[in-house]
Amino acid sequence: MIVKGEFFVAEKENASRLRAADFARICGTNKRTLHHYDQIGLFAPALRGENGYRYYSQEQYDVFMVIAALKELGMPLLDIKAYLDRRDPERLSALLDQQEAEVERELAQLRRIQTIIRTKRKLLERGRRAVCGQVFFEDCPPALLILSEPIHSADPAVAAPILYEHLARCHREGWNEGYPFGAMISGKSLAAGRFDEYACYFTQVEHPAAGVPLFEKPAGRYAAICLQGDYHRAREAYRQLLDEISARGLRPVGCSYKEGLWDEIAQRDPAQYRTKISVAVE
């Protein structure tokens, strides 16, 4: 044997061939993987020496990289072998089309995960800036909401199945962008002090797909309060919010919106959860 550069190569007729360990190093894999691929007939060495060593050629590099890419996309090894055994330009074109579509699906999923991360970061910062227990006023842009089926009841036995179906639908359709579910109370229920009587649940989205049924939360001036603690124990916060609106000579308009800022993702202790309650005013 002689040494050529970093890799050991065979003498004479094998001078352009690489031993398994060196070929594995170039390809970012290991000898065990090469041995397995050889055993199942997926990727055989270009030459087997009398000494039992397996030798690979530089031309095999591209073939191995294709195998690695297809495997990373989730294509079973037996399917990869079936293609390689019968490969031709037409089959390659069809395979590339199929795998490009799979890559697009993977990219869409990664973009969705990135959106969720950015949303969670935004909510985390809002929760940090919030001063709990104090009413404040803010100008809000419009927001796009996906609504559950109507509830109009304070009975958990009525509300819970509607919530579960709403959450399942959002997950099934890929509508989750990182916003926790929220709850709306109608203006009528709000005025009557029925703060546990939800009109519906909602999930906010920023990049809805075409055809998704949406409700637009109006832009405008909103009164809001942040509640710390149990999401469901908000009666005092609602009352404080309405009292402050009245004291300012204003009146609530439309539905109120209750939405989480810090939930079980941000805090282990439910006593530290933070929830924002808001309603448009005029």
Image (cartoon, helix red, strand yellow):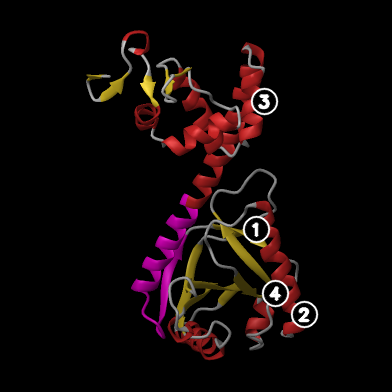
Q: Residues within 10 Å of mark 2 (few under 14, many from 20)?
A: few
Q: Which mark is residue 23?
A: none
In the image, residue 139 lies in the stretch drawn in magenta: yes
Kindly report the distance in space between the C-alpha atoms of the residues bearing marks 3 and 4: 56 Å
Q: Secondary structure at mark 2?
A: helix
User: Which numbered disc, 3 or 4, marks the residue that appears first in the sequence?
Assistant: 3
In the image, residue 269 sits, relative to residue 127, either above or below, namely below
- The residue tagged 4 is 199
In what element is the residue under mark 3? helix
At x 50%, y 87%, the residue is 237
Q: Is residue 195 magenta?
A: no
Say which of 233 and 270 sits in front.
Answer: 270
Disc nearest the viewer among 4 and 1: 1
Q: Is residue 9 above or below residue 121?
A: above
Q: Is residue 61 left or right of residue 149?
A: left
- What residue did someone put label 1 on? 171
Q: Is residue 102 above or below residue 253?
A: above
Residue 61, horizontal then vertical, whole percent: 43, 21
* Segment colored magenta: 114-140
Q: Which residue is mark 2?
A: 158
Q: Quadrant of residue 150?
A: bottom right
Residue drawn at 63 percent across, 12 percent down: 88
Q: Amino acid at mark 1?
A: His
Q: Which element carries disc 1, helix, strand or loop?
A: helix
**Which is more foreground, mark 2 or mark 4?**
2
Q: Which amino acid type is shown beneath numbered disc 3?
A: Ala
Q: Residue furthest top?
A: 13
Q: Residue 82: which numbered mark, if any? A: 3
Q: Nearer the viewer, mark 1 or mark 3?
A: 3
Q: Could you tell me which secondary element the residue under label 4 belongs to?
A: loop
